[in-house]
């Protein structure tokens, strides 16, 4: 890797630091270390519930980003993987694995979708968030 490519890669990693929100008004607060380890929090109020904040962990390499969040209340884990785009957004696909009863087919326990995160906090208060659309991972999980 050339010095210029290394500088560009380091800049892209630094660009991922901060607060991001998606189309469902979920927020991530991320910090990427020099070696590409991503850590932070994921806050959502999907399904009309009170805001929930969970730990986020993952990796970033150049423009590639991947992170996961465990949602204990909903008995699921969701992972996002995608790219930091030229327009400054994080475009990713997500897969959510639900913990289902033994009598349920496993194919019903994995859901997929897409998110686009843009820099900055949500435009709406998470306390008064609108109900998320059906494509959101937590929309489909039962409330306890």
Image (tube, rainbow, N blue to C red):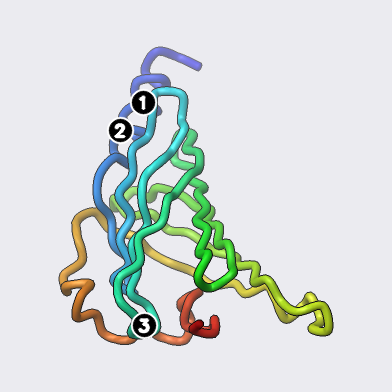
Rendered position, 49 above or below 32: below
Residue 14 circle label: 2
Mark 2 and mark 3: Cα distance apart in space: 30 Å
Residue at image x 32%, y 67%? 26
Q: Residues within 10 Å of mark 2 (few under 14, many from 20)?
A: some
Q: Which circle's residue, 2 or 3, is located before the other in the chain? A: 2
Q: Which circle's residue, 3 or 1, is located before the other in the chain? A: 1
Q: Is residue 130 left or right of residue 67?
A: left
Q: Secondary structure at mark 2?
A: helix
Which callout, 2 or 3, points to the residue nearer the camera?
A: 3
Rendered position, 93 above or below 139: above
Residue 132 circle label: 3
Q: Is residue 119 left or right of residue 106?
A: left
Q: Residues within 10 Å of mark 1 (few under 14, many from 20)?
A: some
Mark 1 in CB contact with mark 2 (< 8 angstroms): yes
Which of the pair 51/94 is nearer the observer? 51
Q: Residues within 10 Å of mark 3 (few under 14, many from 20)?
A: some
Q: Residue furthest front?
A: 144
Q: Secondary structure at mark 3?
A: loop
Residue 10 circle label: 1
Mark 1 and mark 2: Cα distance apart in space: 6 Å
Which of the pair 80/6 is nearer the observer? 80
Residue 69 position in % (x across, y down): 50, 56
Residue at image x 17%, y 74%? 124
Mark 3 and mark 1: Cα distance apart in space: 34 Å
Which callout, 3 or 1, points to the residue nearer the camera?
A: 3
């Amino acid at each position: 890797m050339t010095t210029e490519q290394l500088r560009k890669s380091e800049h892209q990693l630094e660009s991922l630091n901060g607060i991001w929100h998606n189309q469902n008004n979920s927020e991530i607060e991320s910090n990427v270390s020099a070696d590409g380890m991503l850590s932070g929090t994921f806050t959502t109020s999907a399904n009309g519930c009170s805001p929930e904040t969970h730990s986020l962990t993952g990796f970033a390499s150049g423009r590639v980003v991947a992170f996961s969040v465990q949602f204990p209340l909903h008995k699921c884990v969701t992972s996002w993987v995608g790219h930091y785009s030229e327009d400054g957004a994080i475009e990713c696909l997500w897969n959510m694995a639900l913990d289902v009863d033994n009598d349920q087919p496993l194919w019903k326990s994995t859901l997929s979708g897409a998110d686009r995160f843009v820099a900055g906090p949500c435009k709406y208060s998470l306390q008064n968030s609108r109900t998320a659309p059906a494509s959101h991972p937590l929309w489909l999980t039962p409330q306890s």
